[in-house]
Amino acid sequence: MIALTLAEIARAVGGTLVGGDPDTRVTGTVEHDSRRITPGGLFFAFPGEKVDGHDYAPTAMERGAVAVVGQRPVDAPTIVVEDPLRAIGLLATYVAPQLDATIVGVTGSSGKTTTKDLVAQLVAELGPTIAPAGSLNNELGHPSTVLRADADTRFLVLEYSARHIGDIDYLCRIAGPRIAAVLNVGTSHIGEFGSQDNIATAKGELIEALPDTGLAILNADDPRVRAMAPRTRARVVLVGEAADADVRAEDVTVDERGRAVFTLVTPEGSVPVALGVPGRHQVGNVLVAAAVGRELGMSPGQLGDILPRLRLVSARRMDVFDRRDGVTVIDDSYNANPASMAAAVRSLADMSGNGKRRSWAVLGYMAELGPEEVAGHESVGRLAAELGVDRLVAVGDGAGPLADGAEKVAGWAGEAVRVTDQEAAIALLGGALSPGDVVLVKGSRYRTWQVADALREGLSA
C-alpha cells in the first residue's frame, strides 16, 4: 500500500483511533491473516462464527504490524469501526485514485482467473504489476488486492465476480478499471441470478463503470456479450473468431497436447501464434490479453513474441501432467459450470487424439445451477458422448445426470459409471487405467480434488 498515517486511515474508513500516535505511518502490507503481516503493516481483524480475528492481533503486532482495524479496541493501537469488511473497501476506495496505475478488469461466467493471470503476465512486460493470487475477486479479495499496490505499481489487474446484480458495481466503486473485458455470459450461479439475462446485466456493470477514455473488450462470439456495447461510454474492441472481430484468431488448430495454434489478426497486422497453454478455449482468453497489450502500445510482433510465453498460474486449472505409467491427467478441478466443463471435455477429446488414446472424463456435481441443474449436467454428458469420450465417471450425489446425458446419445460406444464419492472414483481408476489413457478431472470446488491429487501422487495403473 502507499504509505499512510493512522490518522489518514481512520478518516478514510470512518473509524476512531484508540491508542497509538496518529502520525504513525503504515508502510507495510495490509492483511487479514496475522501470519502474513510484514513490518509496518496494518492488520484487519474480522469477527467470525468460529474464529475471531481480534484474538490474533497480538500475533500481528509481534510480526511488525503498527495498528489493528477492528470492531473493538485490543491491546494495540486500534482503529475502531462498525464493520471491518466495509472498512477495507473504504480504505481501498481512498487509495485507488492515488495510484499511478492502469487498472485492467476482467469478468465473465468462466475463465476470469485464467484470463486475469494471462493479462497480468503480459502487462508485467511493461512495468510493475499487481494481480490477485487465485480467485480473490469478491468484496474482500478485491480491496485486499488493491491495497497491495504501491507507488511503483504501473498495472493493477483485477477480476470482478458477482452472485447478484449490483455486486460488480460495488467493486467498481472501490476500484474501477480503465480497460475492462467481458468474457462470456454462461450459467454459473444461475441459481442465484435466476436467468442468463440477469447474469448479463450483472457482468455488464463492469463496462458501464468505464470512463469515456476507457476501453471495453467484448467477446464477439458470445451474443449476450456482444450486445453489451451500447452500455458503455468507452471505445469498444471486439475479440474472438467472428469475421468482424477487431482482434481475432484465424485458422485455429490444436496440437497433441491440446495447445492452440492460430494466426492473430489485428488492424495493425497479423502474426502466427503457438500457445504454450492447453485448451482450445484458451484462444479467447489470450485474445483478451492481446487486446489489452495492443491498447497499451504493443505491436503484432511483440504480441507474437509474448503470447506463446504465457503460462497458467493458478492451481487446478487445465494443469496437464504425465505420470510415470504413461497416463496423462488434466487437473481442471478447481471449479466448474456447464460452459467450463464443456470446454474441458473438448480439450480431453483433443488430447486423446479424438479416439487414438482412451479417454476418461471424471466429472463431479456442478453447484448453484438452480432450475437448470439437471439440464446443465445432462448437456455436458451428451457432449462427452458426442465427442467420443470412452469412459464418463459421474462422482457423487447430484452428478448422475451427467451419466444420464451420455447414455441418451444413440450409438455412443463408451460407458458411463456412477460412483458414490471421490474415494470410489479413486478405487475405480486404480484398477482400470492403462498406459496411454487421458483422464480429465473436473467438478465444482472440492468435488473432485481428491481424485486429482490421488492421480498426481502416482496412483498405480
Image: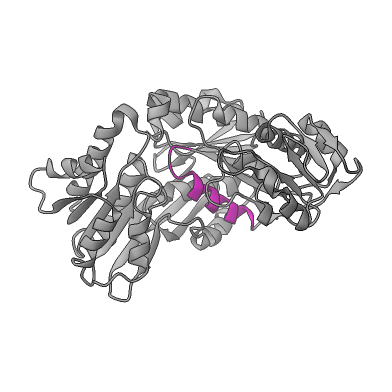
Picture coordinates of residue 442 (x, y %)? 34, 51
Q: Is residue 271 above or below residue 3?
A: below
Q: In front: 108, or 255?
A: 108
Q: Is residue 325 above or below residue 51?
A: below
Quadrant for the C terminus in the image: bottom left
To which quarter of the image does residue 424 belong? bottom left
Residue 283 magenta: no
Residue span colored magenta: 108-124
Observer able to see residue 215: yes
Q: Main secondary structure of the magenta part?
A: helix
Going by the image, does 221 lie left or right of 391? Answer: right
Observer able to see residue 331: no
Q: Is residue 83 above or below residue 111?
A: above
Picture coordinates of residue 371 (x, y %)? 30, 27
Name of the residue lying farthest toward the left? 411
Going by the image, does 97 lie left or right of 436? Answer: right
Picture coordinates of residue 59 (x, y %)? 72, 54
To which quarter of the image does residue 262 belong? bottom left
Q: In front: 284, or 50?
A: 50
The residue located at (45%, 31%) in the rendering is 225
The residue located at (36%, 58%) in the rendering is 450
Looking at the picture, the colour scheme in use is one colour
Going by the image, does 225 lie left or right of 2? Answer: left
Picture coordinates of residue 161 (x, y %)? 52, 36
To which quarter of the image does residue 372 belong? top left
